[in-house]
Image (spheres, rainbow, N blue to C red):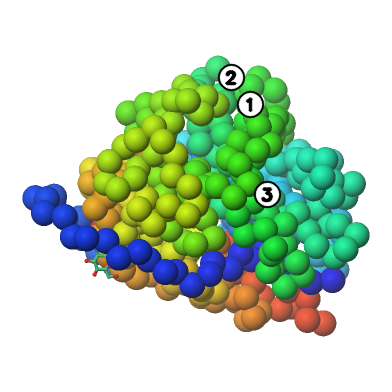
Amino acid sequence: MSYRSGLIFALAASTAAFAAKCTPKPKVVDPTVSGTPQVLGIVTDPSLNRDSCNSVKFQNRVLWTCRDTQPVGLDGKPTLPIWDTSASWTDLDADGNPAVQPLSNGTNALLMYGANDARQPFFPLLPGECNDNSAGMCPDGTRYALWHDTAPMVASGADGGVLTAYTWVRKSHIKGDFSTDDPDPATTLYKMTYDPNSGHDALPSVSVVDENFWLYGGLPYGAYGNVVKDGIAYLYGKPSNNNIVLAKVPIGSVEDKSQYQYWVNGAWTSTMPSLADSASANIPNVSAGGQGTYYFSDAWNSYVWIGQAGISVSADFFITTAPSPEGPWAQPKQFYSGENGNFMFGAYSLQAHPELVTGGKNEIYLTYTKNDVIDDNVAVYSTPLIKVQWQ
Ligand SMILES: *[C@@H]1O[C@H](CO)[C@@H](O)[C@H](O)[C@H]1NC(C)=O
Ligand SMILES: *[C@@H]1O[C@H](CO)[C@@H](O)[C@H](O)[C@H]1NC(C)=O
């Protein structure tokens, strides 16, 4: 049994050459770290071993969604079953900051909680996805790894009442070595519904809007990242050819494909590009090529992406910024390196957590999956929480 299953390898980026356009230069944000970033502790539910968590604010607390999840046994080692995805809550303190507190063993932690007793994937495996087991393991040794790359996108109820949110997940069907015969699978749109009266530990309910929202062999808009600004959802996708593409839709019309527009050849169009055409839709420098997080920074009045390089198992965080979601994006630059784990996949799933920043402060929280061997070649995950102050 391998415990390294949460990793997604991005393939070598082949960025399409883009003709330079003669547009006036916008105000350039030059992100510069102030002082030394602070490792605040770990984000953990001590009863669970899991990787690749991202997070979003659901009203007055924070929902985290993670990939492979396992119970931790009495000996501190992960046990079975594995389930494909899980979710948990964390609390904010009275000032709106993440409620980091010391555990009885002295380690500082942002404690995750919530009803994961069913040990079933938060984003359900569907018929045809080897859903007779919680890991999506198929009899032929392949696996449906429905590993989301992004945090849920809140569509309504952000401030109260029933909240709805969406996540796009590629129907990844992988072999034991993480390779796949289906590099561009269909993308499933999941919807989360959260009633704040449903109890302290209750997790949002999850339903399937459309198993094949984006068709097999097409572009996975929304699976790579999302940012919502002024009522418009901007949805990034990264197919197997590593072109990074962008769609937009009014936040109230996420389920209605006729309302989408696509960024192609430097303009918005209602005609979706094909995978073969996607070089004309690629946005230069919109990320460093790997997993990460898009958000809007009020302090900078700028769109931001923070994440990892395309082929990376190191906690090397890159940033790029742009005055609008479609760019122009600055060349990504590295701004922080966290401690890598000592397992061969030492660090991955680098994320930013803008929802943990209060009061327009010019700072950002980061996490990543750190993977360490404890003994008998058993690797365990941890999620360091880091606070970065910008100049
Ligand atoms: C303290 O407990 C937490 C939760 O079980 C664990 O992740 C952490 O590694 C422990 N710290 C030490 C120093 O053993
Ligand atoms: C994007 O990055 C490349 C180098 O990787 C650089 O040559 C180019 O000028 C950048 N584009 C923009 C729009 O800044």
**Disc 3 secondary structure class:** loop
- Between 217 and 342, the residue placed more toward the observer is 217
Q: Mark 3 points at which residue?
A: 171
Give the Cα separation between the discs numbered 1 and 3: 22 Å
For the N terminus, give its image quadrant. bottom right
Q: Are the residues flagged by discs 1 and 3 in contact, CB closer than 8 Å?
A: no
Residue 380 visible in this rendered orientation of the protein:
no
The residue labelled by disc 1 is 193
**Quadrant housing residue 357:** top left
Along the polypeptide, which appears first: circle 1 or circle 3?
Answer: 3
Judge whether 187 appears above or below 195 on screen.
below
Instruction: Tell us which disc is closer to us: 1 or 3.
Output: 3
Few, some or many C-alpha atoms within 10 Å of disc 3 (few <14, some 14-19, many ≥20)? Answer: many
- Residue at left offset 68%, top offset 54%: 172
In-front residue for pair 245/48: 245
How many C-alpha atoms fall within 10 Å of the one at disc 2: few (<14), some, or many (≥20)?
A: some
Alpha-carbon span between mark 1 and mark 2: 7 Å
Mark 2 lies on residue = 162
Q: What residue type is labelled 3?
A: Lys
N-term-proximal mark, 3 vs 2:
2
The image position of residue 2, as x and y in percent, is 79, 71
| Secondary element type, mark 1 | strand
Q: Does the residue labelled 2 lie within 8 Å of ligand 1?
A: no
Which residue does the image show at 68% across and 36% down from the upper left? 211
Cβ–Cβ below 8 Å for labels 1 and 2?
Answer: yes
